[in-house]
Image (tube, grey):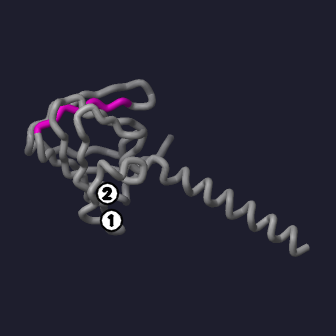
Amino acid sequence: MQKNLKLILSVFILCSALSSAGLFAQDWVKVNPEMNNIIADTTLLRATIATIEPGAKSEIHTHPASFFYALTDCKLKVYYTDGQTETFDLKAGDAGYGSPEKPHQTENTGTKTAKFLLVELKEHPYIDR
């Protein structure tokens, strides 16, 4: 009886760990920590200074609703997993906001390091529909 209980508990812990890993697999800070310097992280928001070197491409990730502010001039290309792409030619001081963003990769297609402030609103996460 005790042996079966231990086996069931072990399987439960393993399944929980695997499923929770999937929950965070698309969090940009977790899949590309080298591109993010967290400057604030509360229950409501997370603010990061994002840095993407020329030619670098992020792992696939999503974002909750967010606001960005370009700290440098930069050229970015976003590759969505549904095949869509977008390009951005930002100047330092450009800003914008958006709804939760579907799975994508971001590439710095420019020749200079891209830096921007990204403020994510945790209460408005991306939900796969």
Query: At x 11% / y 43%, what residue is drawn?
Result: 72
The residue singled out by tag 2 in the image is 121
Query: At x 27% / y 30%, what residue is drawn?
Result: 77
Across and down, in percent, residue 50 comes to 25, 49
Asked whether 77 falls inside the magenta stretch, the response is yes
Across and down, in percent, residue 27 comes to 42, 51
Q: Which residues are magenta?
A: 73-79
Query: At x 49% / y 43%, what residue is drawn?
Result: 128
Q: Amino acid at mark 2?
A: Leu
Say which element carries label 2.
strand
Across and down, in percent, residue 117 comes to 20, 52
Q: What is the magenta segment's predominant secondary structure?
A: strand
Residue 2 versus residue 78: which sits nearer the camera? 2
Q: Residue placed farthest to the right in the image?
A: 1
Q: Please say if the residues under marks 2 and 1 sit with CB atoms less than 8 Å apart.
A: yes
The residue singled out by tag 1 in the image is 44
